[in-house]
Image (spheres, rainbow, N blue to C red):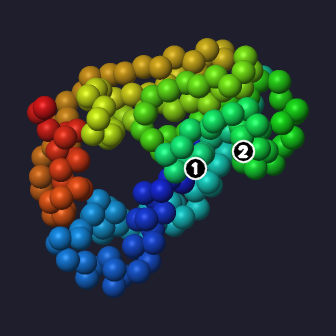
Amino acid sequence: MCVKGNHDERVTALYRDKDQLWNVSLEERTWAHDNAQKLSEVDIEFLENLPYSIAFTMDSIGYSMQHMYNNYETIPSLHHYYSFWEQQTKEPITSMKHKRMIFGHTHRRAIHYLSNHELWMNPGSISYRRPDDPCKEAHYMTITDGRIDMKSLQYDRSPLLQATLSTTLKKRGELDVALVFFGEN
């Protein structure tokens, strides 16, 4: 299962606007430009057709998966959780006793309980995270028989570093952040 994220949106918009995609100065070139130039029409159509959210049931627990709640905000209360659940799933909040939302936008591992039966979680990121996150392991989550396990795995980042160094990205921001994560330190 896959949902559309903000980078997917940016890449597809750039791909469709060929002038913005190919006529960007080196000082403004971002990861979105780099990625959009590497994709085909089939790839773009796949990204465009991804849903913004998916609702499903697993082990008698209702799930709603979407990329983000509200930019970098977290869900502050059970009331906000219920409203967002109904907006994403189109189901009344009473339809399932146990509900879980899955997000990814912040790249920060977390499980937040709003009650004994309602929680939202973020598995983290398998590669790129925020500059203030010192951990450089791949983060992921498994759910087996309703049990959530947050996991991490060391991996060789050197191919990613080499790929990053071979791209032309604006020096401030895009390249600096990539070097923080993929670099040695």
Q: Find out whether the residues at labels 1 and 2 contact each other: C-beta distance under 8 Å.
A: no
Residue 8 in picture, x, y percent from top left = 46, 59
| Res 84 visible | yes
Where is residue 21? Give x, y as percent.
32, 76
Vertical placement of 151 versus 48: above or below? above
Q: Which residue is mark 2?
A: 84
User: In the image, what residue type sits under mark 1?
Assistant: Asn
Residue 85 visible somewhere in the drawing: no
In the picture, the quarter occupied by the C terminus is top left
The residue sitting at the bottom extreme is: 19
Quadrant of residue 130 within the rendered picture: top left
Residue at 24% in and 68% down: 29
Q: What label sits on residue 70 in the rendered view?
A: 1
Residue 36's disc is none
Sequence-first tag of 1 and 2:
1
Q: Is residue 121 above or below residue 33?
A: above
- Residue at image position (52%, 60%) is 46
**Amino acid type at image mark 2:** Phe
Spatial CA distance of label 1 from label 2 is: 10 Å
Mark 2 residue element: helix
